[in-house]
Image (cartoon, helix red, strand yellow):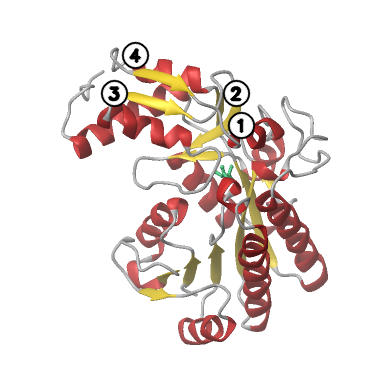
Amino acid sequence: MQDRIIVLGASGQIGTVLTAELRKIYGRDNVLATDIYPNSVSEGPFQVLDVLNIHRMAEIFEQFKPTQVYHLAAILSANGEANIKKTWHINMDGFLRVLEISLEKGVSKVFFPSSIAVYGRTTPKINTPQDSPLLPSTVYGISKMTGEVWSDYMFNRYGLDIRSLRYPGVIGWQSIPSGGTTDYAVEIYHAAFKMGHYDCFLKEDTVLPMIYMPDAIRATIELMEAPKSQIGVHYGYNLSGMSFTPKEIAESIRYFMPEFTISYQPDFRQEIAESWVRSIDDSKARSDWGWKPEYDLHKMTMDMLMHLQNKYGMTVISPLS
Ligand code: AKB
């Protein structure tokens, strides 16, 4: 049977890239992109959808008849703190509606993006094990942790096959994140081209787990395509790419752009970053469905700069470097 996929939140940072990749695999017209913003996603079917509009969501599911749903719509950690009720409403009620409709319409697989924001002050910070204590410090983190518990419940109670990853900060050249604490690691590359300088909102030695977009997309699709018998975790798999500080990413840019400078003006996001962990043990994802990241910091910086130099019309690295 031909899979048909709905992506909710398809205009966001991950949704933009994931939708294009899913279309390559499943065919343009078998992947319906939806978002509250009619943004420029890859060519193919698109519907405006607010995830809180349950009637419209039910209509879209009824018409498109998806076999898989990727639910990416959410307000991120930093923006979430400015309006905690709205964040809870969108992140949690939106997800519950997706679960309800998916069950009702017989969707066979659902993807729920969790995050390193589920970790908190009781979580071991180094090489964080899969089943660590979680005490998130943001509403976004609380919504992700609760979403994980709902996912596990829906799998055990109703057999709904929900799969989930705890994304680290995701870095990519194709799209810009908005309202997250790890956003600095994308902004810095654009600032290097636009200003030759970046004013970072985190301290220079703040270590956070990150992942390059191609690894994040591959992890998502590999998880969703793995046989059900290999999936031992239906809440959120720990997922690791690399860990680095603002100082280290600046140094990796300076390797190719020696004139680049950085300064530090930590704001409220510093506290959020410090409540998260520094490195992650993702051995469960590796042993269950064969996860293995490909990009480290140097390889990612080289690829980011290669792509962004076309966008900004400034050559800093030759294809043979
Ligand atoms: C954020 O910074 O809020 C997100 C995340 C780590 O989930 N990028």
Of badges 2 and 1, nearer the viewer stands: 1
Up/down of 209 relative to 74, above or below = above
Q: Quadrant of residue 289?
A: top right
Q: Amino acid at mark 2?
A: Thr
For label 3, the SS is loop
For label 4, the SS is loop
For label 1, the SS is helix
Q: Using the image as rendered, state which of residue 297 and residue 201 is in the foreground.
A: 201
Which badge, 1 or 4, comes first in the chain's sequence? 4
- Provide residue 54's location: percent of width, then percent of height: 59, 81
Distance from disc 2 to disc 1, alpha carbons, whole Å, reads 8 Å
Q: Amino acid at mark 3?
A: Gly
Judging by the rendered image, the residue that carries numbered circle 3 is 196
- Provide residue 95's location: percent of width, then percent of height: 64, 67
Up/down of 128 relative to 149, above or below = above
At 33% from the left and 67% from the top, the residue drawn is: 28
Dot 2 surroundings within 10 Å: few (below 14), some, or many (20 or more)? some
Judging by the rendered image, the residue that carries numbered circle 1 is 270
- Provide residue 123's location: percent of width, then percent of height: 79, 34
Of badges 3 and 4, nearer the viewer stands: 3
Q: Using the image as rendered, state which of residue 185 and residue 149 is in the foreground.
A: 185
At 81% from the left and 41% from the top, the residue drawn is: 131
* Quadrant observed for ligand 1 in the rendered image: top right
Dot 4 surroundings within 10 Å: few (below 14), some, or many (20 or more)? some
Q: Are marks 2 and 3 in contact (CB under 8 Å)?
A: no
- Provide residue 267's location: percent of width, then percent of height: 56, 33
Res. 255 mark: 4
Res. 131 mark: none
